[in-house]
């Protein structure tokens, strides 16, 4: 298993889901660091790839992953219809100094 030794002021993840990495991402943020995460959600299988449920967030899952770990500034769970259609979840959250 990889051990993260570096910390970052910001982490951006798009179109990628590997659930075991969530804890490492949270631990790799400095106090006040920002996580911006967007990836596919259930329902996307009707619009395109990915279709495998292993790569699709469950309803509310991204929000639940950060609960108690980061302070949520913004969260969306929606169907994007312009350009490439997709069902996604998006979050912007900050690691507080608590």
Image (spheres, grey):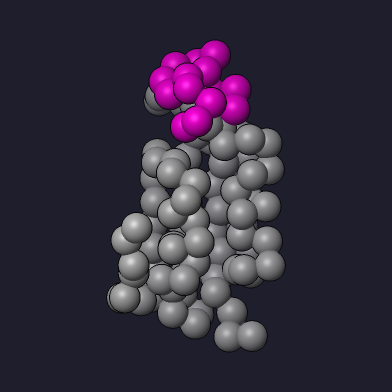
Q: Is residue 83 above or below residue 39?
A: above
The residue furthest bottom is 97
Give the residue drawn at x 44%, y 79%: 30
In the displayed structure, 7 sits above or below 44; it is below
Quarter assignment of residue 74 = bottom right
Q: Is residue 74 above or below residue 59?
A: below
Q: Residue at x 34, y 69 (%)?
A: 4
Give the residue at the far top of this rendering. Answer: 46
Q: Is-magenta flag for residue 73?
A: no
The one nearer the camera, 43 or 5, is 5
Q: Is residue 26 visible?
A: yes
- On the image, the x and y values in percent for residue 26 come to 49, 66
Q: Nearer the viewer, residue 86 or 29?
A: 29
Visible residue check, residue 73: no
**What are the residue bounds of the magenta stretch?**
42-55
Residue 10 in the image: state x and y as whole percent. Answer: 39, 69
Q: Looking at the figure, which quarter contains the C terminus? A: bottom right
Q: Position of residue 86 (x, y in %)?
A: 49, 26
Q: Is residue 46 above or below residue 10?
A: above
Q: Quadrant of residue 83?
A: top left
Q: How many marks?
A: 0
Q: Residue at x 47, y 71 (%)?
A: 27
Q: Position of residue 95 (x, y in %)?
A: 54, 74
**Residue under the point 67% across and 52% down:** 64
Which quadrant: the N terminus?
bottom left
Position of residue 54 in the picture relative to residue 64 (left or right): left
């Amino acid at each position: 298993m990889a051990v993260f030794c570096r910390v970052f002021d910001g982490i951006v993840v798009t179109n990628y889901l590997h659930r075991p990495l969530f804890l490492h991402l949270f631990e790799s943020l400095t106090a006040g660091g920002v996580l911006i995460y967007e990836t596919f959600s259930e329902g996307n299988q009707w619009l395109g790839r990915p279709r495998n449920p292993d790569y699709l967030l469950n309803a509310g899952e991204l929000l639940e992953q950060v609960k108690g770990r980061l302070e949520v500034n913004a969260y969306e769970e929606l169907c994007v219809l312009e350009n490439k259609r997709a069902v996604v979840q998006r979050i912007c959250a900050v690691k507080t100094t608590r």
